[in-house]
Amino acid sequence: MDRTELFEPLHHRGDLVVTGHLGVAAPLVVTGSLTVGGCLYDHGSEGRIVVGGDLTARAVFSGGELLVQGDIRADVVQCVTLDPRTTASGTVRAGLVLEQDSSGASVEADVHLDYDSYLAGRPGSQDELQERLRALLVDEVFTRDWGDNERRLDRWELFDRLLDGQQVFRDDHG
């Protein structure tokens, strides 16, 4: 799949459609909706993304500043936070949502988790969560690199597979 990297600021009036992947390393402002046929990802704090309408992509990975006034629709959404005041004003709809800081956003997902707490193996419903993740995702996105010999979801492997156009969800995922 084609990959477009944005290194200069872009202000686009109206809706914007990108057929492949879109990497953002400079401010991007879209006054309408943004549709990305592949993955949308930023390069940390350099990649500020503002969308006046809805955001639709195969996957959204943001470690920087992301503000979407409408809904976010994707197979996978990974953000530092999805706080409705600073990130997603509408509803986040995805198969899998990973947040580093829990936000209270409106989320409709098969699995929605605080990724840092998950990696730390904090007590609670960890076993149930692990079962839900294993039922949702292919085995290849789980690794044993966490020092305790447990196989946990590796968000970087997940992202790499999405960029390569490989399957991340099990065949029976609806």
Image (cartoon, helix red, strand yellow):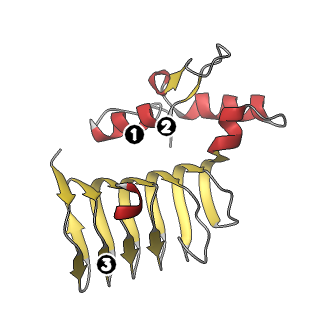
Tags 2 and 3 touching, CB below 8 Å: no
Q: How far from the left and from the top, in percent, is residue 25?
A: 28, 60
Question: Measured along the vertical axis of the image, is residue 136 above or below residue 151?
Answer: below
Q: CA distance from mark 2 to mark 3?
A: 26 Å
Residue drawn at x 40%, y 80% as measured from the top left:
53
Q: CA distance from mark 2 to mark 1?
A: 6 Å
Neighbours of disc 2 within 10 Å: few (<14), some (14-19), many (20+): some
State the residue position of label 2.
Answer: 155
Q: Amino acid at mark 3?
A: Val
Tags 3 and 1 touching, CB below 8 Å: no
Q: Amino acid at mark 1?
A: Phe
Neighbours of disc 1 within 10 Å: few (<14), some (14-19), many (20+): many
Earlier in the chain: of badge 3 and badge 1, it is: 3
Left or right of 81? Residue 14 is left
State the residue position of label 1.
Answer: 159
Neighbours of disc 3 within 10 Å: few (<14), some (14-19), many (20+): some
Question: Measured along the vertical axis of the image, is residue 44 above or below residue 17?
Answer: above
Q: How far from the left and from the top, in percent, is residue 61?
A: 42, 52
Secondary element type, mark 1? helix
Which image quarter holds the N terminus? top left
Mark number displayed over residue 46: none
Secondary element type, mark 3? strand
Q: Amino acid at mark 2?
A: Arg
Tell which of 106 and 6 is nearer to you: 6
Mark number displayed over residue 29: 3
Q: How far from the left and from the top, in percent, is residue 76?
A: 47, 49
| Quarter assignment of residue 73 | bottom left
Secondary element type, mark 2? helix
Tags 2 and 1 touching, CB below 8 Å: yes
Residue drawn at x 50%, y 22% as measured from the top left:
139
Q: How far from the left and from the top, in percent, is residue 143?
A: 52, 21
